[in-house]
Image (cartoon, helix red, strand yellow):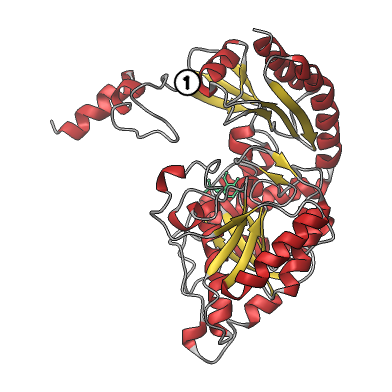
Amino acid sequence: MSSIEMVDRTDKTDWFAAGAPHVWRPYCQMKTARPPLRVARTDGALIILEDGRELVDGIASWWTACHGYNHPHIREAVQRQLERAPHVMFGGLAHEPAYRLAARLAAWLPGDLNHVFFAESGSVSVEIAMKMALQYWINRGVMGRARFLSFLGGYHGDTLATMTICDPEEGMHALFAGVMPGQHVQSLPRDDAGEAELDAFLGRHGAEIAAMIVEPRVQGAGGMLFHDDEVLKRLRRLADRHNILLIFDEIFTGFGRTGSLFVSGDSSVVPDIVTLSKSLTGGTLPLSAAIASDRIFDAFWSDDAGAALMHGPTYMGNPLACAAANASLDLFEEGRWKDQVERIETGLRQGLEPCRDASGVVDVRVMGAIGVVEFDKPVDASGLCARFAQEGVWIRPMGKVVYLTPSFIVSTSQLAELTSAIRRVLAG
Ligand code: PLP
């Protein structure tokens, strides 16, 4: 009997013990970390563990499962597509799910954000947006615009290029300082003085910058930091004044999370490129997109083959993922998300407000379906996570924040369970 068959057999009795020595876990010092919780299945806003416990999911699997897990409409769409074609390469071939999805995204996004390039993960879509920006200038015959401007508190991914545009301290990649080429990371211009400062900075460095990139309204993984739309207007103004492209990374904020379908447009600012992922498929399958304006696309439209965007991830436009995304868009079209997010916003305000009095809490803030309790110093994320699980909820704090980003279908009582668990745990 081969060793492969033997592993298969033992797997059936204890898949965790068989796999644990081989799985490299994310964001985890595996030597000291608690073992992960074993999930049997998911349902709506619930994660059901192997031991039978049901946890109300407070973070919708890293902000993806906006319609809840196993939504029947998405599941049926994926099942139908599975029968037809689970995957087919995108180079030289076209399929309905991706073409329909591209047309819908172009119609939903504001302005002339008309050109959709698909990938599989958020980080890769940000890399593609960066590559589009760099090549935009090269194709236009402008040399020397080889760097990016990003913002303190920002997070754009874990791949090498995206690491360079994260907050150098809060963006999880401080260890790599000096290893990767440095980018310009500045403060967001929150007032006139901030705008003047950034203006002066761009006066000195603008000619070497291809694009500025920001998570609009909410900087997520860098600390759930909010800013108002005026900041985005300032960025658009500065980008135009210094002839720099503006990229909105809406991987977290897109699809209703802040109360608007997209911050692009709703903030009255239209970026030159926008990135989407996470809730794009309703949290069902990996998919992302970098979507460019006509102006960007036109710089690649040429008789010169060398001007093309030389990019094509193997699984780009995966039909199953695009079918899931189209089904998720159907659910957004039904329009219930807006009331759901408003209801969640009210519940988060009521439920989290008392946390202001807890020891070490410096701020409580809510925007749309995002609720944040911020502490004066980094929290014991793993210890808190375990405590929350004992309380019957799945909440994974990060840095200085305990936060909630539940799925939009979370019931009022489930939401109350989430906020009361936070209150109880903070009270000790
Ligand atoms: N950009 C933003 C704003 C994100 O929040 C994330 C992930 O949290 C990413 C990019 C990276 O996405 P992914 O983890 O799918 O690579």
Label 1: few (<14), some (14–19) or many (≥20) C-alpha neighbours in 10 Å: few
Q: Quadrant of the N terminus?
A: top left
Name the residue nearer the viewer: 369 or 7: 369
Give the mark count.
1
**Which residue shows up at 46% across the image and 21% down it?**
38
Relative to residue 297, is residue 82 depicted above or below?
above
- Percent coordinates x, y for residue 49 in the rendering: 52, 18
Relative to residue 46, is residue 111 depicted above or below?
below
Looking at the image, residue 11 sits to the left or right of residue 176; the answer is left
Residue projecting furthest to the top: 428
Question: Which residue is tagged 1?
Answer: 37
Q: Amino acid at mark 1?
A: Leu
Residue projecting furthest to the left: 1
Q: Dot 1: what SS? A: loop
- Percent coordinates x, y for residue 305 in the rendering: 48, 87
Name the residue nearer the viewer: 267 or 257: 267
